[in-house]
Image: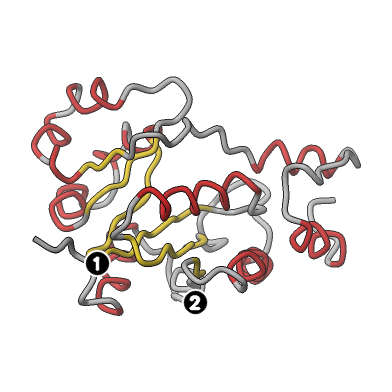
Amino acid sequence: MQENRVIAVFGGSFNPPINSHISLAKEIIEKCDNIEKLIFVPVSTRYQKRELVDDQHRYNMLKLICENEDKLEVSDIELKHDKQLYTIETLNLIKNQYNNYDIWFVMGTDNLKEVETWNNPEQLLSKYKILVLDREEDDLEKIIQSSDLLRKYRESLIQINGIDKIYLSSTMIRDKLKKGEDIKEYIPSPILEYIYDNNLYK
């Protein structure tokens, strides 16, 4: 039986996008043959997060990553909306755009532990697949067994074998930038140039 075509949605603040975000996105595509595209979805500044630079800057930096990658895109769907969207609302809008695709949402185990507190978590888990990434020392099976909701929708949770546990830290990069430290090894050169040209994170 032919597998459904899939679009993966990778949300976050991307403040700034770093090498780990890009390598993780490429690894997801590489290990999942039915994922045809991964879309970065940056949150808007309505999302009250510390030191979040302007929406357009974060969108532009992600565009720099995606412009030479056939299977990577960035969407401004949350940035252009007149209110802060819940994840379920964002995924519903993307599903409307790509009706012939299954939509998988990329989520770290740190967020999965809190998913019951999200807006309409049952609809999220019943309607969409969650591509779960191990975060640091988390154990996915223990997280699932600790939640009635996650046990109920166990089939909606997809774990990719062979992907390293994630240790993403844009916060660390911002701190290094403030101190004037060299961050070339952590961030793509076009994004680094953009940060310096626009005097970000000073």
The kind of secondary structure element at disc 1 is loop
Nearer the observer: mark 1 or 2; the answer is: 1
Image point 40% across, 66% down: which residue? 37
The answer to whether marks 1 and 2 mark residues whose Cβ atoms lie closer than 8 Å is no
In the image, residue 131 sits, relative to residue 45, either above or below, namely: above
Query: Mark 2: few, some, or many residues within 10 Å (few <14, many ≥20)?
Result: few
Horizontal side, residue 138 vs residue 96: left or right: right
* Residue located beneath label 2 in the image: 80
At 67% from the left edge and 53% from the top edge, which residue is drawn?
A: 16
- Rendered location of residue 99, percent (x, y): 22, 77
Amino acid of disc 2: Lys
Residue 5: mark:
1
Image location of residue 38, percent across then percent down:
42, 62
Left or right, residue 114 beside residue 66: left
Kind of residue indicated by mark 1: Arg
Q: In the rendering, at what x and y percent does residue 194 appear?
A: 79, 65
Counting from the top left corner in percent of width and height, residue 130 is at 27, 48
Quadrant of the image containing the N terminus: bottom left
Q: Residues within 10 Å of mark 1 (few under 14, many from 20)?
A: some
Q: Which residue is depicted at the point 50% across and 66% down? A: 72
With respect to residue 105, does 76 lie above or below? below
Q: How many labels sit on residues?
A: 2
**Camera-side residue of 180 and 68:** 68
Q: For the residue labelled by badge 2, is the local secondary structure a helix, a strand or a loop?
A: loop
Q: Quadrant of residue 7?
A: bottom left
